[in-house]
Image (spheres, helix red, strand yellow):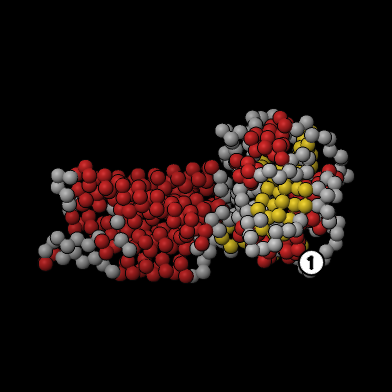
Amino acid sequence: MTLVLSAVGLTYEIAAGRVLAPYFGTSLSTWTAVIATVLGGFSLGSALGGLVAERPRALAFRNMRCAVVCTAALMAASPVLLVVMHEILAGGTIAMLVTVFIVFFPASVFVTLPTPFLTKLAIEARPGRQGSSLGLVMAAGSIGAIFGSIIAGFVTLPFVGSVATFAICGAATLLCLPFLKHSGLGANHEDRPGYVTPSLAAGFIGWTALSGFSVCEFESGLSCLHVVKAGTATVLVSDGVTQAAEPSGDVVDRTGDPQLSLPYTQWVWARMDRDLGPDARVLFIGGGGYSLPSAFLRAQPLAEAVVVEIDPLITRVVMENLPRAAAVIDAEGYDTARADEKQSGRMAIIHADGRVFLNETDMRFDAVVMDAFSSNSVPAHLVTRETFQRLADVVRGPVYVNLIDVSDGPLARGVFAILNEIYPHVEVVQSSLDEQGRGNILLAASTVGFLPMSALPDGYVRAHISPDRAFTDDRSWSGLR
């Protein structure tokens, strides 16, 4: 039973970090909040469980059963509670910390509450073997934690999603109830566990699993995606952040027309159109909605694109919901890992981490577009001095970078410092800011000067970035704002 509860606890912790992403993003701060909250709950639960273990045996068994039922119900209810708390508190760091505590702390307390009592039972069952009994209980807890982390990361979250993962945690916890029946009281004092409350908890868990409630329209272990209609555009949203958009309506192949809806893509495209030749080979790290690589290939019939997108789900959702990008992928794209598909075309699609690809590739490119995001920020390992030094080795032309940050914010300053170290020419523009004071910060860097652009997209201005420390693999971007 200790093994099962430990497995449930670690699965719950990982699922908590994942389900938080659509509402508060994925960053060092969100994961720190989740880990600290869950570990804090584990600690309090163990302390309270020690006090319960000292109570009379029958009362302790009843308390343990109550803790198991509470754990099951609270874990299954976590996604619903998260939605409610986000509606009440909205965004921001303080709101995130409060939400994480209220949603995930109680279940974390209850799931560890039985452990001291179970440890006491194990020690009493083997008189004179207290040391080995304690060691076995601790080993079972560690093995369960390992098992739970593997189940969450490689099985439940990628294949059934976060809501079902929480329901599975609750169901697995309820399965421990039959093992918490005290039979040592004699015939006249039989411990009769109640079945009404566990039955209600089981029904609630079943409802959460089968009701159709979902945090995500499409979900993998990496992405929580929604496709929404916004006016005349179809928008792809990933973890609550607009990833791509394209005009709705029939697909019209007009060579030279980029057909781009988002202003940041319009600026990158205009910059590429002025900087690159007609037969350029461009690396795109981050496929997103495939808007830019598709526009690039439509406008340049001799060009080639290599798109490195970590999540195959994004590619599949684009193919099913964004017809303009899908038409280009269908005509020109091929997945380099699929031996059963064609291995020719002008768009090579590589489902891999961008940094891993850079470390291993022997390909060479005329330009690169860095447009990879994890929720509302760039993955830290893609904005380090070492990453851009490797880019300088494999890319002989300009580097285009899309960031989301506050005006002259820490992320923009760190990346700007890196580019200034490597390239003599760096250009920066920024979009208008949202209600949180954040917007797109776009950088272009090159060994040669840039030709001036006739105009900027609506809402964009030239940006000033202050000097700051360049990010490195050792001291990288933290995600804190």
Rendered image quadrant of residue 326: bottom right
Helix, strand or loop for disc 1: loop
Q: Position of residue 220 (x, y in %)?
A: 55, 58
The residue at which mark 1 appears reads as 251
Which of these two is toward me, 430 or 279?
279
Q: Residue at x 76, y 48 (%)?
A: 282
Q: Position of residue 138 (x, y in %)?
A: 30, 46
Q: Position of residue 36 (x, y in %)?
A: 44, 43
- Quarter of the picture containing the C terminus is top right
Q: Amino acid at mark 1?
A: Val
> In this rendering, does residue 176 appear at all?
yes
In the drawing, does residue 242 fall left or right of residue 176? right
> In this rendering, does residue 402 appear at all?
no
Which of these two is toward me, 354 or 215?
354
* Neighbours of disc 1 within 10 Å: few (<14), some (14-19), many (20+): some
Give the residue furthest to the right. 454
In the drawing, does residue 410 fall left or right of residue 79? right
Q: Residue at x 57, y 49 (%)?
A: 25
